[in-house]
C-alpha cells in the first residue's frame, strides 16, 4: 500500500515526488529530503547579480567540455605524463557517456517550481544523475594525481555540481549520484606519476 503523498504546492514537483514515493520507504525518505533541500536551495540565497556568472560557469561543464579540454591540455603540455593524461581524460569521457545512458534508463524528470523557473535551458528533460556532477568529479578524481596538490579540482567540481541545483535543473540527489558515479569512474583513470 502506498503512503499518502505529502502536499507539495507545485504540480510538476508533486508529480515527480509521487513517482519517487512509490519506490519504498528508503526511496520515500530520500524523495522527501530531496524536495525539501531543493526548495531551500532554490528559494533562498538567490541574487540577480550572481545568476549570470553562475550560469556562465555552469555552461563550461556542458558535455564535460571544460574537463575534457583540461585533460587534453595536460596531455599536450605535459609530455612525460601524456599517457596518464589521456587515460584520465578517457575516464572523464566514459563518466559522461555512462551518465547519459543512466539518464535514459532512469528517466527522472527535472525539477520544476512554478514561481522559480529554471534559469537555464537544458538539452533534455532528464535529471538523474547529473552529468555535470559526474564529469566534474570524474575529472577531479582522475586529474588529482597529475596536478599539484593545491589544485582546486574538488572545490571546482563541487561548485559545478551545486550550480545545477542553484540554476533549478537538478535535485540534490541528482548531483550526489552524479558525484559518486564520477568518483568511481574517475578512479579507473587516476594515475600517480
Image (tube, helix red, strand yellow):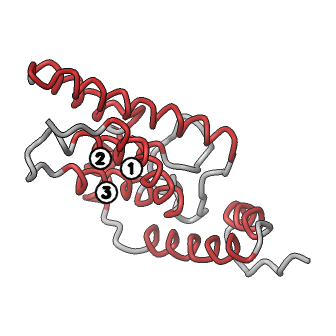
Residue 74 or residue 40, whichever sits in front: 74
Quadrant of the rendered image containing residue 14 = bottom right
- Whether residue 88 sits left or right of residue 123 in the image: it is left
Q: Which residue is mark 2?
A: 141
- In the rendered image, the quadrant that contains the N terminus is bottom right
Task: Name which residue lies at 9% across and 19% down.
Answer: 79
How far apart in space, not on screen, are marks 1 and 2 (Cα)? 6 Å
In this view, 5 is above or below 54: below
**What crowding class fits label 2: few (fewer than 14 Cα within 10 Å), some (14-19), or many (20 or more)?**
many
- Whether residue 68 sits left or right of residue 8 in the image: it is left
Work out whether mark 3 precedes mark 1 in sequence or the reverse, and give the earlier one. 3
The secondary element bearing badge 2 is classed as helix
- Whether residue 47 sits left or right of residue 14 in the image: it is left
Residue 190 or residue 162, whichever sits in front: 190
Task: Name which residue lies at 30% across and 27% down.
Answer: 87
Label of residue 158 in the image: 3
**What crowding class fits label 3: few (fewer than 14 Cα within 10 Å), some (14-19), or many (20 or more)?**
some
Point out the frontmost of discs 2 and 3.
2
In percent of width and height, residue 25 lies at 73, 77
The secondary element bearing badge 1 is classed as helix
User: Which residue extends farthest front?
Assistant: 193
- Whether residue 142 sits left or right of residue 79 in the image: it is right
Residue 88 or residue 175, whichever sits in front: 88
Quadrant of the rendered image containing residue 59 = top left
How far apart in space, not on screen, are marks 2 and 3 (Cα)? 12 Å
Asked whether the residues under the numbered discs 1 and 2 touch, taking CB atoms below 8 Å apart as contact, a structural biologist would say yes
User: Which residue extends farthest right?
Assistant: 1
Label of residue 183 in the image: 1
Work out whether mark 1 precedes mark 2 in sequence or the reverse, and give the earlier one. 2
Amino acid at each position: 500500500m502506498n503512503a499518502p503523498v505529502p502536499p507539495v504546492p507545485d504540480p510538476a514537483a508533486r508529480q515527480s515526488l509521487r513517482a519517487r514515493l512509490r519506490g519504498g520507504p528508503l526511496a520515500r525518505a530520500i524523495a522527501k529530503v530531496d524536495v525539501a533541500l531543493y526548495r531551500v536551495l532554490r528559494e533562498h540565497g538567490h541574487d540577480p547579480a550572481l545568476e549570470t556568472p553562475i550560469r556562465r560557469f555552469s555552461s563550461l561543464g556542458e558535455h564535460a567540455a571544460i574537463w575534457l579540454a583540461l585533460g587534453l591540455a595536460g596531455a599536450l603540455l605535459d609530455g612525460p605524463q601524456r599517457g596518464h593524461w589521456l587515460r584520465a581524460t578517457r575516464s572523464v569521457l566514459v563518466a559522461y557517456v555512462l551518465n547519459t545512458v543512466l539518464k535514459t534508463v532512469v528517466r527522472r524528470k527535472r525539477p520544476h517550481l512554478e514561481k522559480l523557473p529554471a534559469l537555464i535551458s537544458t538539452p533534455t528533460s532528464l535529471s538523474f544523475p547529473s552529468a555535470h556532477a559526474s564529469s566534474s568529479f570524474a575529472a577531479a578524481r582522475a586529474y588529482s594525481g597529475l596536478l599539484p596538490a593545491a589544485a582546486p579540482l574538488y572545490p571546482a567540481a563541487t561548485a559545478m555540481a551545486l550550480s545545477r541545483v542553484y540554476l533549478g535543473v537538478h535535485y540534490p540527489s541528482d548531483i550526489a549520484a552524479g558525484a559518486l558515479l564520477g568518483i568511481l569512474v574517475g578512479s579507473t583513470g587516476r594515475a600517480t606519476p
